[in-house]
Amino acid sequence: MKTTIYCFTGTGNSLKVARDIAAGLGDAEIVPMREPQPAPAAPSERVGIVFPVYMGGVPMIVGRFLDRLHEPGKYVFAVATYGGSPGSSLNEARRRLAAAGTSLGAGFGVRMPGNYTPFYDAYPKDRQEKLFAAEAGKVKAIVEAIVSGRTSPPESGNFIMNLLFSGIVHPISAPKIPASDGRFSSDAKCNGCGVCARVCPVGNITIEAGRPLWHHRCEQCLACLHWCPQTAIQSGSRTAGRRRYHHPDITLHDIMRQN
Ligand SMILES: Cc1cc2nc3c(=O)[nH]c(=O)nc-3n(C[C@H](O)[C@H](O)[C@H](O)COP(=O)(O)O)c2cc1C
Ligand code: SF4
Ligand code: SF4
């Protein structure tokens, strides 16, 4: 059975999970969820959506896609990658799909290294390795569930965290995200290479006079900050001394093709 997997990613965790699921299923195509968005109807019998959790919810670009995805009668699954908790992101996906006439068969969370460098440093390598080992086991279980067409309620975080992040932080923060790129700057290490513009999934960066300029339609995916070869992009004052992260199996070339 052919499967289309729509994927959004900043630092490659979600792309890695999408690839592993595609490999497990066979005959699966990964379609980037970037701007301009893909057509909201898949040329396949089965549909998947893979995305990172942002503030307990779905990234805005993913939400816009879910609102248009009209796939009645197909088995549809969603997978959220997250650093701490999936929150209510998969329930949000289920609600938004339902409003578009699409029934979510199952929603799975996969814990991966957190990438929100404005708040914390990259995880140490040994911690990353443990998460990658667990990811392999979780993907195996996800593939088995998909192949058998199993339906189940979306996985969710605990009640208190969902209330805090999905119920309070996400609704307050989401409208501010497009202009949140006002916190980005490039430091003296920038050599004008243009990589940041090429990895941005929404075309939010242009290079002007050899430096990136952000245009306030940001998704906060942090691809620009993490993939800059010179580590020249900072967000506020705390990221300068922090290590950058991307999934080790995903290359810059992969992200340029994806985004
Ligand atoms: C803007 C932003 C918000 C995030 N919010 C959360 C969150 O609320 N809960 C969580 O567990 N992880 C959160 N994370 C971490 C990511 O969900 C996690 O690292 C994810 O696997 C990144 O996927 P990617 O590499 O495909 O971009 C956040 C990351 C970003 C960039
Ligand atoms: S990727 Fe980094 S070095 Fe290259 S233009 Fe952007 S900020 Fe400058
Ligand atoms: S400007 Fe940077 S953080 Fe914002 S969407 Fe583009 S790559 Fe992601």
Image (cartoon, rainbow, N blue to C red):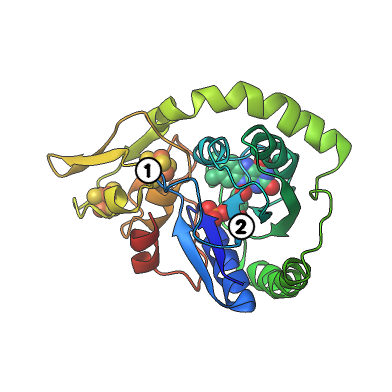
Residue 197, image x, y percentages: 28, 48
Residue 136, image x, y percentages: 69, 75
Left or right, 56 with respect to 28, comes to right
Residue 202, image x, y percentages: 36, 42
Left or right, 138 with respect to 59, comes to right
Name the residue nearer the viewer: 59 or 241.
59
Residue 32, image x, y percentages: 44, 55
Residue neighbourhood size for the residue with mark 2, other residues' Cα within 10 Å, grouped as few (<14), some (14–19), many (≥20) = many
Going by the picture, which residue comes out furthest to the front? Answer: 73
Q: Which structural element holds mark 1?
A: loop
Residue neighbourhood size for the residue with mark 1, other residues' Cα within 10 Å, grouped as few (<14), some (14–19), many (≥20) = few
The number of numbered discs placed on residues in the rendered structure image is 2
Q: Earlier along the polypeptide chain: callout 2 or callout 1?
A: 1
Q: Residue at x 32, y 60 (%)?
A: 229
The residues tagged by marks 2 and 1 sit, at their Cα atoms, a distance apart of: 18 Å
Residue 189 can be seen, yes or no? no
Left or right, 33 with respect to 45, comes to left
Above or below residue 156? Residue 250 is below
Residue 148 can be seen, yes or no? yes
Residue hosting label 1: 35
Using the image, tell me which numbered label, if any, was put on residue 15: none
Q: Which structural element holds mark 2?
A: strand
Q: Residue at x 41, y 35 (%)?
A: 218
Q: Give the amino acid type for the residue marked by disc 1 in the picture.
A: Glu
Image quadrant holding the C terminus, namely bottom left
Q: Are marks 2 and 1 in contact (CB under 8 Å)?
A: no
Q: Give the amino acid type for the residue marked by disc 2 in the picture.
A: Gly
Q: Kindly tell me whether mark 1's CB lies below 8 Å from ligand 3.
A: no
Going by the picture, which residue comes out furthest to the right? Answer: 159
Residue hosting label 2: 48
